[in-house]
Image (spheres, helix red, strand yellow):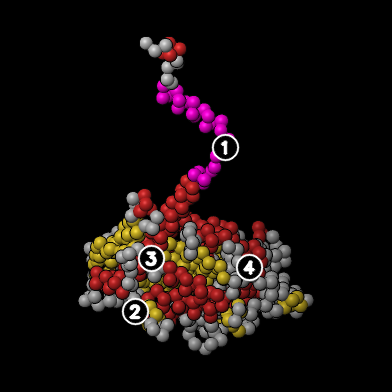
Amino acid sequence: MDSDMLIKPDARPVFARLARKSSQFRTDEGGAMAILVLFVFVMMVLFGGIAVDVMRFEMRRVALQETMDRATLAASNVVLPVSQTPQSVATEWFDVAGLGDELTYDYAVQEVTGEATATSRKTTMKAKVRSYNWFMHMLDVPYFEGPTISTAQQGVSKIEVIMALDITGSMAESSGSTTKIAALRQAASNFVTILKYDKDAGGAYTIEKDPNNLISIGMVPYSSNVNIPVDLRNQFTVSHLSYWNYMADQGVPKINCFEIQPETFNTMKLDRDVPIPMAAVALVAKGAPNATITSIGTGNTYGGVVTISATNATAIDTNSGTYMCNHGDNPNTGTDESASNLVVLPMTNMTALKTQIGQLNPRGNTSIAVGMRWATALIDQDARPIYTALRAGVPGMAGRPADNADDEGVTHSDGTMGTRKIIVVMTDGTHVSSKHIRDAYKSGPSPIWRGDDGKFAIEFNDSGLAPNGGTRPGINPNGVPAPVNSCSGWSLADTIVNGKTVKRNYFVPHLKASSVRRKVGSQAEGAGTGTNVSGGCDPRAWITPPAGVAPWWTGSGVVRRLDWSEVWRYASVDWVIEQLYMRSNVTGATDYNTIYNLMVGNYLTSTSNMDSLLATNCTAAKAAGVEVFGIILGDNVTEAPIQNCSSPGTGYYYKVTNADNLNAAFEEIAKIISPLRLTE
């Protein structure tokens, strides 16, 4: 045995040596960082390379997507001949683009499908892009690859458009280099053109892009109210329809305005079975009490303004802005423009519509709510019977308006898809409440009579308050002796004619002298020689009919009782109050404001009420799927009503500061709702 074996320690195990080396390494402060730096650099290059490869792939994918979008749009144009199928056009576009570089990237078209009908074309293209990596191949990722898809369709949907256009008096004002109304005529006409036509090589809109009449467009010009054609009026149940030439339920020629009730503004439907009050055609402007009335016209229809005395009245002029309901005729032109501001039911014939747009004439106050209410009523599905009756045989109008639920996701058997419903509402002002004739004075027998010579009388009953009755001059109440309530000294007691009692219930204003001499002693009625009193009671103005209940005066021919609607045909509210009520001196009929407020009130009550009704109606439209585009013209217009009415999202609300820019807003909207677009 080796003696060293007794004193030599055993060899240390391997793990013990490793532990010792590790401990030394941890405590050793010498050495270099080269290896660590090299490692970090390699990692930076690698991750930077990954970013480069991802960016290159995304660039290639976007290039492919844009090319496919252009190809499918071109292939989906319905004006292409049938021989050029969607597949062939899309494939040709893709090939001509010259995409692909097999060394760094390439594209592969996987599938091109398409369908073409008489009313639509649809193209779908599927492809993939492969981008070869410059760096990630070191990680065994030689390329990135991803699919893309593009779908386009023209005739995606039928389109129903209603333009609600402001034609109030302020639209006659200058703005920029033109007038507001001139700018509106041009902008609305261009809007129609862009919807129906594409540009040719010269930049003019001459290429038909709606050969199958998928787009219908209507117009609602509005001011204080909305004037509708008589054939449209006849599609509804109405009340308070005017007399004309002493015949009931004729209506006022060329003027038909509804007073749509506020409770209907929470829906689009305008019920055709529930009676809607007609607005009275009446000059309701308030005059100065006891002033001479000068706003009475001539002839048997509404005509020009002439100055008259209180002794005669014929026909009033409806061209004043104080009418809540009027036509658009301008009496200064010498031509009949009464149809200029009529509602145009949606049509596919753009020539006729543009002619009507070109005739718009500014009139009246601003009632955006009423204009919008008509627009929603005419685009609602329940208006279909109206279209069936009034648009029968017009190309493309069968079945319109479409169901409100007929959105773009619905595919029909003829290849067409759902319907886009669009309202464009434009204004240059804020709401202004308008005066109107109250229902009680719109129609029904009035106490006013008119002779063939155009002269008037008014009847006061034996009892009751004015304007239906009232104590008359010369009639002494409760047996009080004259002259307590006498007529310049004479008592206008009942008289007996042919054994009949005839009452002096009729005041005939043109027989009343401007001044009256009072009775002295036993002088004959009306032949007084006493004090001359200006405006005094004249017994001759309370003429006694010979033996009946109707008034009569020499030279007047047949004297007829007027319906209230015919009263307003011949005289203004102001004239009636001044000359028939106040000049009579009947108790209770001498206060101007009392009589005026009985006859006249505010339609839709106030500006805030009209704002609220507009918001309610716009909400109903948007809830039914209607897209609402709003346009404001001018700097001083309150934006909130139109802005809130517009659909949410970009491109639905426009504010232009002057008329020169109005066309740009309409053009932008027309492009947004163009029927040719990408759908996927």
Q: Earlier in the sequence, mark 3 or mark 4?
A: 3
Q: Earlier in the sequence, mark 3 or mark 1?
A: 1
Depth check, mark 3 against mark 1: the one in front is 1
Mark 2 residue crowding within 10 angstroms, few (<14) / some (14–19) / many (20+): some
Q: Earlier in the sequence, mark 1 or mark 4?
A: 1
Mark 4 residue crowding within 10 angstroms, few (<14) / some (14–19) / many (20+): few
Residue 475 falls left or right of residue 90 = right
Q: Earlier in the sequence, mark 2 or mark 1?
A: 1
| Residue 636, disc | 4
Tell me the SS state at disc 4: loop
Q: Label 3 vs label 2: CA separation? A: 31 Å
Mark 3 residue crowding within 10 angstroms, few (<14) / some (14–19) / many (20+): some
Mark 1 residue crowding within 10 angstroms, few (<14) / some (14–19) / many (20+): few
| Residue 30, disc | 1
Q: Are marks 3 and 4 in contact (CB under 8 Å)?
A: no
The answer, for residue 124, to whether it is visible in the render is no
| Residue 208, disc | 2
